[in-house]
Amino acid sequence: MPNITASTLDAPPRTKGCCQPVAGLLPEATAAELARVFTALDDPTRVQMVRVLAEASEPVCVCDFTAAFALSQPTISHHLARLREAGVVTSSRRGLWSFHQLNPEMAPAAAEAVRMIRAAGRPGAG
Amino acid sequence: MPNITASTLDAPPRTKGCCQPVAGLLPEATAAELARVFTALDDPTRVQMVRVLAEASEPVCVCDFTAAFALSQPTISHHLARLREAGVVTSSRRGLWSFHQLNPEMAPAAAEAVRMIRAAGRPGAG
DNA sequence: CTCATTGATCGACAGACGTCAATGCAAGGA
DNA sequence: TCCTTGCATTGACGTCTGTCGATCAATGAG
């Protein structure tokens, strides 16, 4: 946690002008990667999907989701595609059904975000 | 981590039909809160802003950001407003300048996401 | 008071997004 | 072969978002 205290809240003595150089910028690719992960999870439906996949012991098929959410099948398919494009989910067709699961090789940042979703609503997780 | 192994990848023996009830759904409000946090950080510029604020020892003013990013001042102001609305950042005007810092009382989920951004690009963080 | 500076707000625009109905398509079953 | 089923894709629609230029309010200097 940053050490923001009342003293730092008092105006820093910038006697003239402003615009000090900022510090701590991430490499562009790193920031983009984080944004990509957050974008993949910036929708409540996709959060729930990831949650379900994280709790599931077996791969989940599309119809399971369409039954759980009040959304049309194309919309579910669309959200799954977005998660897949972000590398969070892998899909495999098997007969008529296509099964989906969390990608075991997802990026570390994505894995961390998934951990957040798993921890949410648990004892001791606001 | 979910226990997804090769064996679970083999087709679950759903002999007829599909659509098992899903388990692990979050309360609607919890999913929405997580999505809200992720939405606040789903842009590379905002990721960088949070990163800078997390690394800064003093509050940062808008002109610092306009100098750091190749973006117009209204755009910077817009991003800061979004972070503020999400409860990630607090702002305080002081004279001509308005200073911004991470909100020490941000939601736990937001704090966790900020921790992700701090950890990114550090040794041992993909 | 007059003027320059900082930053918030407004208006506009292009692009992305969530959603659905319709369609396409592969895999089984009759 | 034809029909049904599960799902991906397409096309369309309204909304949200990132960005900018222009403008405005507030502050401080002269």
Image (cartoon, coloured by chain):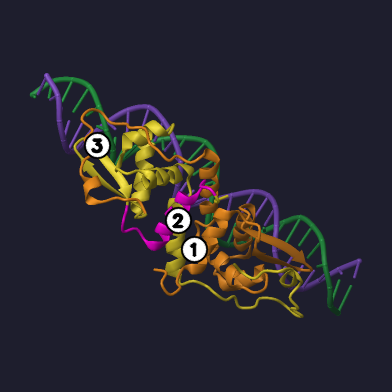
Chain colours: A orange, B yellow, C green, D purple
Residue B66: x and y in percent read 37, 33
Was residue B117 drawn as part of the magenta stretch in this picture? yes
As measured in the structure, the alpha-carbon distance from the residue carrying label 1 to the one carrying label 2 is: 8 Å
**B12 relative to B98, above or below:** below
Residue B92 image offset from top left, x and y in percent: 24, 45
Chain under callout 1: A
**For numbered disc 2, what is the local secondary structure?**
helix
Q: Which mark is residue B97?
A: 3
Give the residue at x 45% y 39%: A25
Residue B29 visible (yes or no): yes
Q: Measure the alpha-carbon separation of dots 1 and 3.
A: 36 Å
Magenta segment boundaries in residue numbering: B103-123
Q: Residue at x 31, y 51 (%)?
A: A3
**On the image, numbered disc 1 is attached to which residue?**
A116
Left or right: A65 in relation to A19: right
Q: Taking A56 as reference, is B56 left or right?
A: left
For label 3, count other residues whose C-alpha is less than 10 Å away and answer few (under 14), some (14-19) or many (20+). Answer: some
Q: Which residue is mark 2?
A: B113
Helix, strand or loop at mark 1: helix
